[in-house]
Amino acid sequence: QRLLPAGPGAENESETVASVRKGRAQSVLRWFTTVVLCAAFLGLGLSVAILGPTFPDLAKNVNRNISSLSLIFVGRASGYLCGSMIGGVLFGCINHFLLLGVSLSATTVGLYLMPFCKTAALLIVMMSVFGVSMGILDTGYRNVCLSES
């Protein structure tokens, strides 16, 4: 509420203030989106790299030899390929940021559940699902981030 009566040109002034606020809000939203996307893909890179250092522990966890557990790399690569194809189709139909969020959540759940797999078959399936979510994320990165620049 205004304390002083509105003088001539007050409506024009309020429109200018509204447009400045809208511009600031869009700028903040753009920065927030950029920071969230950078954090998401930093997490994606870390989750891709985590398999190497944890491979001996995963082999011990499922009571298998390291050489006999190399199928988890095939499972992850197959899932990645399928996820890239699925992501290419889904990004044409669904909101990009929603799909990125769901895929990042699936990647998080997959990373969390991996140490709890007690059989090699379950670990290979989990790595395949993890690969699908990573493939969707990578396709989403190329689709969302590179198309806007």
Image (tube, rainbow, N blue to C red):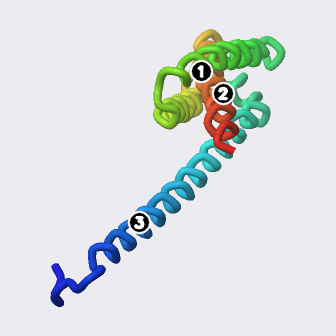
Q: Are marks 1 and 3 in contact (CB under 8 Å)?
A: no
Q: Is residue 104 above or below residue 37?
A: above
Q: Nearer the viewer, residue 79 or 91?
A: 91
**Cα–Cα gap, marks 1 and 3:** 37 Å
Q: Where is mark 1, residue-wise?
A: 87
Q: Position of residue 41 (x, y in %)?
A: 66, 42
Identified at 53% across, 30% down, the residue is 103
Label 2 crowding class (10 Å Cα cut-off): few <14, some 14-19, many 20+?
A: many
Q: In the drawing, what numbered circle is on residue 19? A: 3
Q: Nearer the viewer, residue 100 or 21?
A: 21
| Residue 117 in view | yes
Label 3: state its secondary structure.
helix
Looking at the rendered structure, the number of numbered marks drawn on it comes to 3
Q: Quadrant of the C terminus?
A: top right
Residue 139, quarter of the rendered image: top right
Q: Amino acid at mark 2?
A: Thr
**Cα–Cα gap, marks 2 and 3:** 35 Å
Label 1: state its secondary structure.
helix
Identified at 47% across, 66% down, the residue is 24
Instruction: Work out which residue is located at the far bottom of the displayed protein and give it.
Output: 4
Identified at 57% across, 16% down, the residue is 89
Q: Are marks 1 and 2 in contact (CB under 8 Å)?
A: yes
Q: Position of residue 60 (x, y in %)?
A: 70, 24
Q: Where is mark 2, residue-wise?
A: 139
Q: Is residue 26 above or below residue 104?
A: below
